Amino acid sequence: MARIVECVPNFSEGRDKEKIERIVGVFNNRDQVKLINYEADGDYNRTVVTLIGSPEKVIEAIMDMIKVVIDEIDLNHHTGEHARMGAVDVIPFIPVSDVTMSECVEYANILAQKISNIYDIPCFMYAEAAKEEKRIALPNIRKGEFEGMKEKIKLPEWKPDYGRAEIHPTFGVIGVGARDFLVAYNIDVLTTDEKKTANFAKAIRQSSGGYQYVQAGPVFLENRGHTQVTMNILNFKKNPIYRIFETVKMEARRYHMEVPSAEIVGLIPKDALVKSLKYYYDVDGIEFPEDITLHEVVRMSEHYLKLRDFSVDKIIDYFL
Amino acid sequence: MARIVECVPNFSEGRDKEKIERIVGVFNNRDQVKLINYEADGDYNRTVVTLIGSPEKVIEAIMDMIKVVIDEIDLNHHTGEHARMGAVDVIPFIPVSDVTMSECVEYANILAQKISNIYDIPCFMYAEAAKEEKRIALPNIRKGEFEGMKEKIKLPEWKPDYGRAEIHPTFGVIGVGARDFLVAYNIDVLTTDEKKTANFAKAIRQSSGGYQYVQAGPVFLENRGHTQVTMNILNFKKNPIYRIFETVKMEARRYHMEVPSAEIVGLIPKDALVKSLKYYYDVDGIEFPEDITLHEVVRMSEHYLKLRDFSVDKIIDYFL
C-alpha cells in the first residue's frame, strides 16, 4: 500500500482568479501528488487547497507553492474576514494511508526547517506538531495576525520554532502542523428557527457537554430556506456519523421537525462511511459486504445517512 | 426558600454494624439536618452517608461525627478494596437549594479550617474547592493512601491546605470539597454479553469520546441475569437523562437488544427528572404541567424513563 498524506495549505488570496490559478497551477501534472480541489472564498479572501500524495513529494510541491506565493501575495495590502498571519497561513499534514501521526509530525518539522532555511520565513508548529501546550491551538499563535506578529515574534515566549524571530516583510509567518482527518458534516433541519437548531448543536458539541470530538453550530441557508447543524468531526472513529445523525434526529423529534438529509463538505475517508453504514446494516439485520465497492458505499450512504449531493469523488479512497 | 446543601461524608468502616450505628447515630434528631440514608459496603469497608440541611448545621453535625470517628476508627488496622487516606475520607458539599457553588466552596473551607484547628487533622481541598489544578481530582491527592501519606504530606507540593504537614496518627487526613449534584443512573440491557454493553458505555462516556459529563461502564448483574450500563452523570443539566437513555437505546438497536428499564441509585433532584420528562411530553405533543406533583413525577418517570424501583423518597425535593 502506498504511503499517503493529505495536506491542506491555506493561502491568503480568495478574490483574484488569475493569481489563484497561478498559485494552484504549481500542483498540476506532478508525480505522486494529486490536487483534489481548491476552494476560494471572496469574503475570507482566502483559498483552501486539498492535496494528497507521498509525503516527500507533497513537501516538494509545497516548497514550490511558497516560492510562487512570495511573488504573488503581499500581506501588507491584504484584507479579508478570516484571521491570517502568513501569505500561506497554515499547512497541516494529515495521515491517510500507511502513515502514522508521529510520522506526519516529522514531515511537518522537515518542511518547516526547509521553509525557514530556504525562504527565511519563520514557522510555528501547531496541533499535534506543537512543541508546547499553548501552541496547540492555532488561534493562540495567530492572535494579533500579520500586523501584530511583527512585535509578538520578538517576545521570548513567541520565538518561532524554526527561523529567525523576525517576520518575512511581505509574507509574514506560517503555522505548520499535523492533525487527524477532519470530517466537515452538515445535517439539514427543515425549520427556519435557528434557535431550535442551535439547541441540537448544543446537544452534540463538546463545548456544551456533547460528544468529545464534535464542533457544531446552527446556520440558516438562505437559498434552501432552512437551517443546518454544521459540524466538524475531529475524530470520526470515536464520534461516528451515524451516532451524530441519530442524536440530532432524536432531539428534533421533540419539535416534530424533519431531518431529511445531510451533506459532507470536502472529502471523507471510506472508513468513516463504512463504520456508520454498518450500524444501519446491523439494525436492518443484513450482513455487511466487506468487499463493498465505492459506488455501493455512495448508494448506501444516500440511503441510510441521507447524504445529498454526494458522489464517489468525495471519498478520499477514490484518489488513492 | 430554605438554604440547603447536601453533604456526603464517606467513612472507613463498612463491616462492624455497631460501630457504624454509633457513627451515624450522631445524625439522629438534629435540628435542620436530615440523614437521608447511609450505605455500608463490606468489600469496600466503607460507608457513604447522605445528609441534607442548612449549611451551618451540617458543618456542626460533621464536626460531631469526626469526634466520634476519632474514637471508633484506627486506620492502622483498616483493610478494604476502596482507596482511603482518612478515617473520614472525603466530605463533599453539594448545592441543592438557594446556595451557589462558590458558597459551597466557602463552607468547605470553613469546615476544613475547623477540623484542623480543633482535631489537628490536616485537610486537602478538592474538586471545585481545590486550590490548585492537580488537586481537583481526588485520586491525585489520595494516591499512596493512608500508608503513603505519612511521607507524602511532608513534600512541599503536598502540603495540606489546612493543618500541619503531619498526618493524624490514627485518622490520617481528609479531602474536603465541593461539587455539583451527581446522579447515579443505570440502564438495564437485556443481554449477558458484557462486551456489547461495554460498547454502549463507550458510546456515551466522556473518556471514550462521548458526552462530556458522563462516566460509564458495563456491569453484569448476577441476581438479575443481565447487564447494565452503570453511570455517574456529573452535570445533569448539560447531559440530561433522556438523551443518555435514548442514545443507549439507539446503540442497542443494532444488536436487537431490549432496553426495558433503568434505575436511579441514591437521590435525584426533581429538576433532573422534569428536564427529561419534558422531552417526552414534547415528543407526544402534550403540554407539560408546570404544577406537577412529586407523585406525578414518579409516575411519569416510570412511564417515560422506565425507572424501576423508583419512589418519591428518591427525589431530593421530597425532603426539603
Image: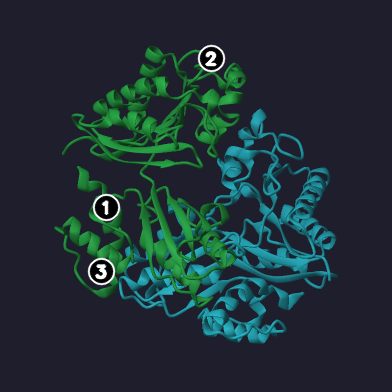
Chain colours: A green, B cyan
Q: Which residue is mark 1?
A: A271
The answer for which chain carries disc 3 is A
Q: Which residue is mark 2?
A: A166
- Amino acid type for the residue under numbered disc 2: Glu
| C-alpha separation, residue under disc 3 versus residue under disc 2 | 57 Å
Q: Which residue is mark 3?
A: A281
Residue at the spot 36% in from the left edge and 17% down from the top edge: A114
- Report the side of B69 relative to A315 (left or right): right
Quadrant placement of the N terminus of chain B = bottom right
Residue extending farthest left: A291
- Amino acid type for the residue under numbered disc 1: Asp
Residue B309: quadrant of the picture = bottom right
Which of the two residues, B93 or B112, is positioned nearer the viewer here? B93
Circle nearer the viewer, 3 or 2: 2
- The mark that comes first in sequence, 1 or 2, is 2
- Circle 1 packing at 10 Å, graded few (<14), some (14-19), many (20+), is some
- The mark that comes first in sequence, 3 or 1, is 1
- Circle 2 packing at 10 Å, graded few (<14), some (14-19), many (20+), is some
Q: From where the camera sits, is residue B229 visible?
A: no
The answer for which chain carries disc 1 is A
Which of the two residues, B59 or A99, is positioned nearer the viewer here? A99
- The mark that comes first in sequence, 3 or 2, is 2
Residue A48: quadrant of the picture = top left
Residue at the spot 54% in from the left edge and 70% down from the top edge: B241
Q: Check if mark 3 and mark 1 are on a common chain.
A: yes
At mark 3, the secondary structure is helix
| Residue B207 image point, x, y percent | 46, 52
| Residue A159 image point, x, y percent | 54, 18
| C-alpha separation, residue under disc 3 versus residue under disc 1 | 15 Å
